[in-house]
């Protein structure tokens, strides 16, 4: 098998609102769209983010009415503190402020208009014990 590309598909109430959030604040661009469907890409992201409106018949029947929950969309970036300040200056609420985990992960989180958590991460060398 050869994988040509990757995507994550999230079921939300308002795909256009989530898409606009990624376009406006994270530099994604719309690649495809239809009623209840938006696919976004970035040349450097390594994957597409797809939003589907809850209830679409393209979703498995027992899955149609569920919403994206318990999912983090994570982007690894440089200058994490700078990204947090940029987003804050754009009016984006930081839902989990910048923190560093003992295993060497620095991160912060925001949420899109549908409540999908977007986490930005920067890897650092963990402190010696």
Image (cartoon, helix red, strand yellow):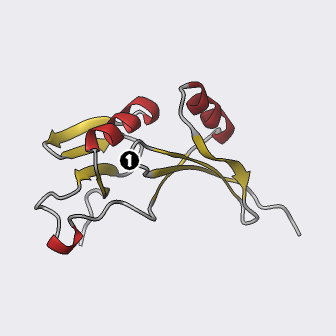
| Quadrant in the picture for the N terminus | bottom left
Corner quadrant of residue 66 = bottom left
Q: Where is residue 35 in the image (x, y as percent from the top left)?
A: 13, 43
User: In the image, residue 51 lies at what x, y percent?
Assistant: 28, 50
In the displayed structure image, the side of residue 110 where residue 11 appears, left or right: left
* Rendered location of residue 87, percent (x, y): 56, 32
- Residue 97's place in the image compared with 29, above or below, is below
Q: Give residue 109's position: percent from left, percent from top.
A: 57, 48
Q: Which residue in the structure is indicated by mark 1? A: 114
Q: Which of 119 and 54 is in front in this view?
A: 54
| Secondary element type, mark 1 | loop
Tell me which residue sits at (45%, 36%) in the image: 26
Identify the image quadrant of residue 128.
bottom right
Answer with left or right where residue 63 lies relative to residue 104: left
Between 39 and 42, the one lying in front of the other is: 39
Residue 109 vertical placement versus 59 (above, below): above
């Amino acid at each position: 098998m050869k994988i040509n590309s990757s995507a994550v598909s999230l079921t939300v109430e308002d795909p256009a609102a989530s898409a606009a959030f990624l376009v406006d604040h994270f530099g994604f661009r719309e690649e495809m769209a239809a009623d209840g469907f938006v696919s976004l890409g970035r040349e450097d992201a390594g994957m597409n983010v797809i939003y589907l409106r809850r209830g679409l018949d393209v979703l498995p029947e027992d899955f149609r009415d569920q919403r994206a929950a318990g999912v983090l969309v994570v982007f690894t970036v440089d200058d994490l503190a700078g990204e947090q300040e940029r987003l804050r200056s754009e009016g984006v609420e930081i839902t989990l402020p910048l923190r560093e985990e003992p295993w060497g992960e620095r991160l912060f989180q925001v949420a899109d208009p549908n409540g999908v958590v977007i986490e930005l991460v920067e890897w650092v060398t963990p402190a010696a014990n």
